[in-house]
Amino acid sequence: MKNENISASLLDELLHAQKIDRRKFIQTSGGIAILFSLYPTITVGQGNRRRYPSDFNAYLLIGTDGRVSCYTGKIEMGQGIITSLAQMLAEELDVALDQVDMVMGDTLLCPWDGGTTGSRSTKVFGPALRRAGAEARAVLMQLASEKLGVPVEDLWVDKGVVSVKSDSDKSMSYAELAQGQRIERNAESKIKHFSEHKVSGKPVRRSDIRDKVTGAAKFAGDIRLPGMLYARVLRPPSHAAKLKSVDTTQAKAVSGVIVVEQNGLIAVLHEQPDMAEKAIDLVMAEYDSPASELNNETVFDHLLNLESEKRPVTEKGDIAGAKSDKTFDETYYNHYVAHAPIETHTVLVDVNADMIDVWCSSQTPFRVQEKIADILNVKPEQVHLRAPFIGGGFGGKKSGTEITEAAQLAQITGKPVQIAFNRKEEFFYDAFRPAAVIHARSGIDERGRITFWDFDHYYPGNRSAEPIYDIPHYRVLSNRASDVHPFDTGAWRGPGSNTNVFAMESHTDVMAWEAGMDPLSFRLKNLSDKRMVRVLKAAADQFGKTFYKGPSGKGYGIACTDYLNTYVATMAEVEVDERTGVVTVKRVVSAQDMGEIINPLGARLQMEGGITMGIGYCLGEEIEFNGGEILTENFDTYSITRFSWAPVVEAILIDNPELAPQGCGEPAITTSGAVIANAVSDAIGIRMHTLPMIPERVLDAIKTRDEQE
């Protein structure tokens, strides 16, 4: 199966050279376009609901060569949907997987999509794609019936070839059926039962592997156009800084440089990126930066002291009337965390008279299309955005400031303009995972059953905030306030869930310790959800270790959650060097029930990647800042997971095909903070309340433990 950057290249050149739209292309392509009106509702932003487009909502094109182009507004950023979505279409259409070419995130060719976020590609887009494939197959079978002169029920199809059951010599390929025709009609169809699957559900290596490891894969920063200029933009020292004065005289003296000073945008452009870098360093600027007492040390007091409005996320029963033998009152904290993708935000914009061409590392191509159209005062259909491979997004690559700047500069200069953030800019303009506080109160009875659960959330987000245990009385409150953070915050792989699960599952261990029970037995005693019990037991069987009443000193941890209807249970073993405070994660076992599994190999890779990435926010990732000034500027002071940190990871897939496919990319990472914090607490005998658990915090906890003893 070809990757979308190669398979769509000739198509792309044709469309770009002739400046034709998709309708004209389909009419002249000699293929069959199966057109549908599929209307799954998708939420885009707060209160903004949109649907897949009804006009030319084509998900596939069958060419005269028998190849099938699959069109999706989703993008590939390492999660593997370039393969799994192709499997879903190949299955319903009855073609071989290597016959499918993926065309992804192209706003001229693909159906509108709200963005690739929230582990929803398979869950939300997959059903529409399956329905499209099933209907296309039905139409083709009807065509074959007419041409071969037999009823549809007397036909069968394999790898895109339709044959008469009683005489295999009588057959027609999809390519032959497609020759010179365009079809706009429906036929009776239904999606296959999972028991019939031959492609979907089978482990398949990712189709982009070869291009990724050989360097053939194209990212936004790899695109080159004739006359292209590299832009560097003057940046403020802090988010609250105001420009007082600027002098671009020395920058203008650099040979070949173009200096732009317009409406607050100050930039230098050159045909060579190093010369643009040299020129921006010569721009002299003065800023007013207001003083601030808000920093890493004061942020949690700041969050707790804001004037906020409390709103219930979920509640049941009467907390005040709950009877408990023991009650607990704990507070949990996490610091700001960056997305830190290896590929920084990059965009290339070329403003032409009839079409604005854009290549962008964005998870939301259609939002970017609309943003550029608004900036340049054109219609959205005049903006053609192509989404090449993206080198990591994690919720952070949406429609940032670099897109606005590149569009304006391309319009001003009349030349293609590329902006690629350096690492300092990437950290400065990131929308961090928010720092947050969760105040937790709960109680248990003499049998070790949870009697009430009262969680007060200070700005983490609400996802995965609902308790998963059998609790008669519970309440989760969310605090809302204005001007919470001194810089942008936003979705970070499993938004809200990482913080919430850390607090919830840490607090569950607190109760288990005081109940005199091991953490596995305590959870099972308080669970009746059969899916959750199943994943928990599956993880325990694979972990193969006996859990003891905590703290046991063994360094074992457990955490489980329901992440948007994907159930996860994770167990970990750690070692803690009490001289240095360094935590070593030795082994992680995670079981996941995501419903029907499309590509088991890809699913395991996503789980392993999520857990490995999660170790970073547990043990090292923390943005250092002073007011609006971001002090973290590169990986020398920002510790994502190193190879030396990586543990043995064992991913277990729970077979549950009766449930439609759920999300896979984010769930496993959401238990990482809790499972490792619980394991560290079990190892050192004192509760860790703050993420990340850097050595200094671990040593402080050990010191507190020793003083208490």
Image (cartoon, helix red, strand yellow):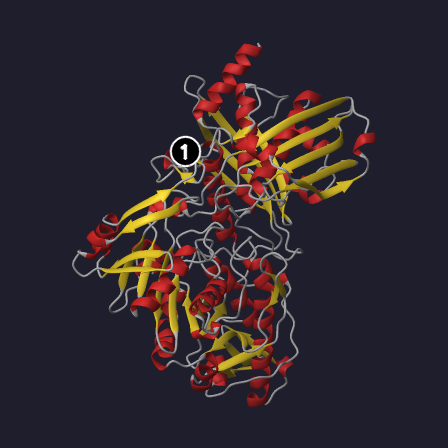
Task: Report whether residue 182 is seen.
Answer: yes
- Which of the 4 image quarters holds residue 154? bottom right
Nearer to us in this view, 257 or 203? 257
Q: Assign a secondary structure to mark 1.
A: helix
Nearer to us in this view, 314 or 605? 314
Residue 265's x, y, as percent? 36, 57
In the image, residue 706 sits, relative to residue 490, either above or below, namely above
Query: In percent of the image, x 46 and y 30: which residue is there?
Result: 586
Residue lying at the far right of the rendered structure: 321
Residue 10's x, y, as percent? 35, 75
Nearer to us in this view, 431 or 344? 431
Counting every numbered tag in the picture gives 1
In the image, residue 260 sits, relative to residue 238, either above or below, namely below
- Amino acid at the residue labelled 1: Trp
Crowd rating for badge 1 (residues with CA inside 10 Å; few <14, some 14–19, many 20+): some
Task: Report whether residue 516 is seen.
Answer: no
Quarter of the figure that contains the N terminus: bottom left
Residue 554's x, y, as percent? 54, 22
Q: In the rendered view, does 529 fall on the left or right side of 22?
A: right
Quarter of the figure that contains the C terminus: top right
Residue 367's x, y, as percent? 50, 63
Residue identifier under label 1: 645
Q: In the rendered view, does 80 fall on the left or right side of 682?
A: left
Query: In percent of the image, x 57 and y 35: which residue is there?
Result: 303
In the image, residue 157 sits, relative to residue 42, either above or below, namely below
Residue lying at the far front of the rendered structure: 244
Nearer to us in this view, 586 or 421? 421
- Which of the 4 image quarters holds residue 410? bottom left
In the image, residue 684 sits, relative to residue 283, either above or below, namely above
Query: In percent of the image, x 65 and y 71: which residue is there?
Result: 190
Q: In the rendered view, does 377 fall on the left or right side of 656?
A: left
